Image (tube, helix red, strand yellow):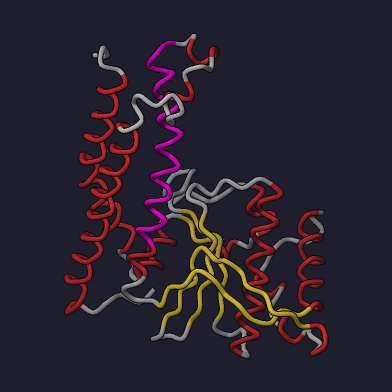
Amino acid sequence: MDLFSPVTSIDYEKAIRSIVRSSCKTFAGAFAEKHLSQINDEDGIINSKIHNVFIAALGSEIQYYSALCRSLDSSLGNMLEAMAISIAEMHYQVTQQVEGNLYEEQTDYIAELLERYKSNEQKPKLDDYLGITTKHNVGSKKNKRHVSDYYLYDQESGMHYLIELKIGGDLDNKKARSEKEALLEQYCILANTLGSEEKVKIYFATAYNRYGEGRPWTQGRVLQFFAKDELLISADFWNLVCKSKEGYDVVLDEYKRCAPVIIDALRDIKDAYLPEAE
């Protein structure tokens, strides 16, 4: 990614930090309010788990944390997705769908390609689908709309990025295939509309590296269907979203600064549900 000029980089860093800070504060308040409002609700997120006798036998704290952690993981993931969109909107046109013509010959080719991936007959690479927009017959087209996690358009470079984000990147075999199929169909629709594939890229992205920052991504289900050049893992994702090589460092640094706000919210929830805990 191209770095921003020194003249604007300081202001831009402040803007990123402001979005991260606002996102964390809003998340902490909403998360605490949701759980505190459910303290007397038998169907609440935490209370609804108390009748699992196998968890309850392990003690009230384990019972509480097992329910809260699932809720925290899901809610935090939603916050990060929304935060990334807010940051991206500073430098990209951001939409979450593509719509246009898709040809039967293209969907047939995609199905054949994915079957070869599934059977390990072929390893994914970028040029597997280059030229796919030439596979069409006017009579076979149909209009199709696809919801996209992130469709970023960079007006400066003319690049179009279609991104499927899974916060931790965990995909089973069925999901990996369906996610790649959806991205390839979006690729076709967009390239058909633009009349060129040259400025269209598809990516599978994660918000963090489950193997540790800087370490290779090795999940077999992902690599069975995605080429390494189609992966945006952790820092690569945030750097693209921020359109800066320092994007990930800035986002993570500010998030760590804001973490006490979320910790305080979690402490308030715990005090309400486990008033006797030390």
> In the displayed structure, would residue 222 be above or below residue 51?
below
In this view, 183 is above or below 215: below
Q: Is residue 64 magenta?
A: yes
Above or below, 118 relative to 138: above
Residue at position x 80%, y 72% in the image: 109
**Magenta stretch mostly in which secondary structure?**
helix
From the viewer's side, name the closer residue of 44 and 265.
Answer: 44
Which residue corresponds to the image point at 44% horizontal and 44% vertical from the top-left? 212
State the image quarter where residue 18 is shown. bottom left
Which residue is located at x 30 percent, y 52 percent?
252
State the image quarter where residue 21 is shown: bottom left
Examine the structure image and report whether residue 16 is included in the region drawn in magenta. Answer: no
In the displayed structure, 84 sits above or below 3; it is above
Q: Position of residue 249 (x, y in %)?
A: 29, 57
Question: Residue 129: percent from the left, percent from the top?
Answer: 71, 75
Location of residue 138 in the rendering, given as x and y in whole percent from the top left corner: 79, 90
Name the residue located 39 percent from the left edge and 67 percent from the top edge: 241
Q: Which residues are magenta?
A: 59-84
User: Which image quarter is the N terminus in?
Assistant: bottom left
Q: Position of residue 141 (x, y in %)?
A: 76, 83
The picture quadrant where one finds residue 154 is bottom left
Count of marks, rendered view = 0
- Quadrant containing the C terminus in the rendered view: top left
